[in-house]
Image (cartoon, rainbow, N blue to C red):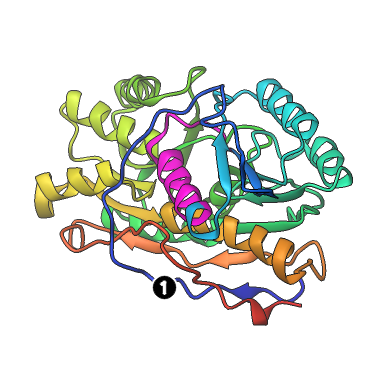
Amino acid sequence: MKKVFALLLVLVLSFSLVACGGSAEPANNGGTEGTEKKIRVAAVPQYPPEEWAQTVLSGIRAACDYYGYDCDDFDCNGETDLQNSILEDCIVQGYDVIIVQCNDGTSQGAILQEAMDAGIVVVDFDCLVMQGADGVSNCTASVKNNDYQGGADALELLVSAVGEDATILYVQENPGVGSGLYRNNGLRAAAEKYPNLKMLTSRPSESGRAAYQAWVQDWILSNPEISGVFCYFGDASIGAYYGCKEADRTDIKIVGYDATEEQVNIMNADGKDCNLIASIALYPGVMGGVCVEAAHEVLENGYSKGTPDEIVWMENGLLTPDNSATFVDSIWSQPVTDWSQFG
């Protein structure tokens, strides 16, 4: 991969995270102020009911308020066909910016190219359009964390907790979801250093926490030797936590992802003995705002990608029971990216 640009994540004063339900209808109708047309932004995350997605949307809204943009968010319920239909509607309605977390990065390049051909700025985040072996994106701008490193770090945390001869269960990635693929690739690559590790994987047919709670219970019932679990996204992490707790298997160590507010609360309540031993932090409230920053740089300052692999990289963090009482996951409040690095 060509030059990678490191984003120095500046944490600001934390605001309360307010979860707002997503809707298949726009949150507002856009509008004008006087005779000047306001920039209209459409935010289309994968699965708005997730706590992580709501925090991203909070960051997007905060940055849109800062720049004076109108923002509508849409709920595709994790369904690629519905997300494509929403994107088509956004193209027809003439949005100026689309901020999208792809449901299927291997198939959605065409519709996002259609949006860009219509003059719409497209910012993909977290799960990018996967074009090429490295998952580079041809969208106008791209924002993400180092998923591969996050998965590798998770494996090392589990090995430290359960040993090199353990049996580890992990959530199988959904086809086309780039973030899950790269996180699990990092996990699997790190596991190759430990030949005595036994790695088990699958995923439930349903989405949501309850499905992952039942999933982990089924696995530990049939494989009681499981001593570690890795979940590459937040709701699966919380489902696995409650599944182990209900099965009276709090000896099983879990490394989760997203470091959501609920995971912070779990660690604070359980203290040092919490079996959710870590969660890779992505700072979604800042990520959402950086997506709007990227759109602003395109619209106002003429930013354009030098190459498809030019990604605005956000730095991973780590939530643990040791730092949960002081962990800060801020909502975006002002520009954090030095755009002079780009171009």
| Residue lying at the far bottom of the rendered structure | 340
Query: Image height check: is 271 above or below 318?
Result: above
Provide the major secondary structure of the magenta segment: helix
What stretch of residues is rendered in magenta? 44-64
Q: Nearer the viewer, residue 84 or 90?
A: 90
Question: Would you say residue 164 is visible in this rendering?
Answer: no
Q: Quadrant of residue 134?
A: bottom right
Q: Residue at x 77, y 52 (%)?
A: 139
Q: Quadrant of the C terminus?
A: bottom right
Q: Which residue is the extreme one toward the right?
A: 117
x then y, percent, for residue 94? 77, 37
Q: What type is the residue that disc 1 sits on?
A: Val
Q: x and y percent of residue 141 in the render?
A: 71, 58
Q: State whether residue 332 is above or below residue 47.
A: below
Residue 72: x and y in percent read 56, 36
Q: Is residue 36 magenta?
A: no
On the rendered structure, is 103 left or right of 251?
right
- The quarter of the image holding the N terminus is bottom right
Q: Quadrant of residue 144?
A: bottom right
Let me know if residue 249 appears in the view: yes
Where residue 107 appears, as percent x and y from the top left, is 79, 34
Reading the image, the residue beneath label 1 is 10
Query: Quarter-wise, where is residue 95 in the image?
Result: top right
